Image (tube, rainbow, N blue to C red):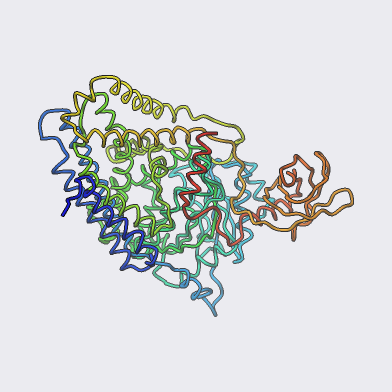
Amino acid sequence: MLALPPLLSAFAGTAVVLGLRLLLLPHLDPRRWYWRALLLGGATLLAWRYMAWRLTETTAPLAWSWDALFSWSFAILEALTVLSSSVAFFILSRVKDRKQEASLHAQWWRPKPPPRVDIFIATYNEQLEVLERTIIGAKASAFPVNVFVLDDGRRPWLAEACRRFGVGYFARPDNAHAKAGNINYALNARRDAADAPDFVAVLDADFVPHVDFVDRALALFHDPSVGLVQTPQHFFNPDPIQHNLGISSAYPDEQRHFFDNVEPARDAWGIAICCGTSSMVRTIAVQEIGGLPTESVTEDFLLTLRLAEHGWKTVYLNEALTEGLAPEGLQEYIVQRGRWCLGMMQIVRNVYGPFGRHRLSFMHRLSVFDSLLYWNTTFAFRLAGIICPLLYWWGGVTVVNASLADIIIYYCPYYIAVMATLNWLSKGLFIPVVNDVGQLVAAWPITRAAATGLLTKGPHKFSVTAKGGDRTRIVVQWPLMWPFLVLFALTVGGLLVNLRSDFLFNNAGTAGDGMVVVMFWTIYNLFVLLVVIAACVERPRLNQPQRQVLQRVVLETQGRELRGWLVSLGTDHARISGPVGLAKGQPAALRLPIIGAIAGRVRDTTRDGYLIDLEPSDDQRSLIIAKLHTASLTPGTDKGDIGLMIRELARALTR
């Protein structure tokens, strides 16, 4: 019997894993805990099989050498990332969906009067264009509410705007404890009012509630032990990576995995967390714990833990009940994630360490440990993955001493199992390169924030995520781009210098086909760095909803009625398909149901119609905003399409 070549036989394990993925996964229901546990458990076993090989077969002998230092440092960091993944996989092994529960317990208070609900809109420096969407959305609530704007910027124009909109306004004398202090001030002001709220919904300044947000969230408070209900954050604009790479129609925003998969899994274990905006709290629960905690800049996660320590549950309703403005610039995107990391480290260091003396349950301690591992390993490992091949090309340092056959035997089955399982339960959200780009672009700021939060007591300064402003120009983020340009140049230079020298030939005998491994690693890094550099070029954008529904409309112009299709709509513009015979500058009123005829003028032609500049009245503007943002629909895309993404990414890189 003929023996297979060693390299071909090495593919046996990979072929088995890939075959199971193709044959079985399409027929398994990711909502069933036993399939989730089986597949995630299998991926975990393959991960630790790989790590056992890494630690015993691929590291340099312990010695006072650069090879040993970098080899073991990288292996230990990789082991910590596998530990982080293992904890995350354990949490993901269950999932809970509360949609039916919310429907069954709608209006649970009957026959008693309905509870009193306030909506708090927390703001610091946002423009009126951003705030008016949220105010109009809150006022459109199907459930009767009192709306209050909490202005930490103490801006007279905003007080006047709130008067015009008919909503309440609070401005405190200082900015102590940032957002948590702002909300606590309003809670204290409302506590003794004649119409003091039983529940308070919290919205960031840029998050618009749908008309059924309050009704649906309130339904889960039928359980008297529930102190907080969190709903997901969806976005009506693409995040910077989606937008700059032109992949928003093929790849969801970066937070979809957390809100669509991680939070429902956490809820199944009783460890769902508050994420600030789009949440609702029971006021007596917050009063019992002394208000929102202020020991961390991520007061939302800390609020969950403080409530849990006092016996109150946080639950999660996975419905698109609000939609917000994702960070529009890459710098704001990174600042936001750095703040999240810093706040988590403050919680671990100063309040609720996973092994500290407090009254949190084992699962809540595991929840904290999971977050601690995630922030401290994922991003540092991504940086190390870029740097390690450079050590080989420029210093001759071998970080991973492995043959190609062993990589295929140990790494490939593990990698394919992890990617296949995660994509099975997340509707294709894990796409190589793009996932790496999202982590790498923020890797250094987050690694620095993690070290700062863990190693220093504070207080720590942080920046509020800027929203709004002029986004109509191309902006190259040079401060963010130049480190990646340097890494790209060093990687290309390392390859060229060594390919033109005797280095490869002198090392071929000792490195063997391990050099092939480093070569593949290097080429992959070059492609990742190229995409990161492209993501640092910010393209012009309009803040208009991704959720645009085609509908029949009428254009009124010069006594004629022209019928067509409304392709997109904003507060000051519309794109119409169908009509012909119009000239630039010609008056053209757009007639919409409920809103009426909106005065307008033809700005330009398109391939199938026209762009119309609109001049709505104040009432019409409010109705347009409500139409765009408050309907019970999901904006954006919630699943990945790798074929479309590759086409869009190629178009963006070659533009």
Q: Residue 624: image x %, image y %?
A: 69, 53
The answer to whether residue 184 of the structure is visible from this angle is no
Q: Residue 231: image x %, image y %?
A: 47, 59
Res 471 → quadrant:
top right
> Looking at the image, is 209 positioned above or below residue 70?
below
Q: Residue 277: image x %, image y %?
A: 49, 53
* Residue in the image at 55% along x and 58% along y: 634
> Looking at the image, is 343 positioned above or below residue 285?
above
Which is more toward the observer, 405 or 444? 405
* Residue in the image at 47% along x and 27% along y: 478
Q: Residue 292: image x %, image y %?
A: 42, 53
Seen as rendered, the residue at the extreme front is 1
Seen as rendered, the residue at the extreme bottom is 111
In which quadrant of the rendered image does the N terminus lie?
bottom left
* Residue in the image at 53% along x and 58% along y: 190
The answer to whether residue 499 of the structure is visible from this angle is yes
- Side (left or right) of 243 relative to 298: right
Which is more toward the observer, 257 or 388? 388
In which quadrant of the rendered image does the C terminus lie?
top right
- Side (left or right) of 535 relative to 623: left
Which is more toward the observer, 107 or 642? 642
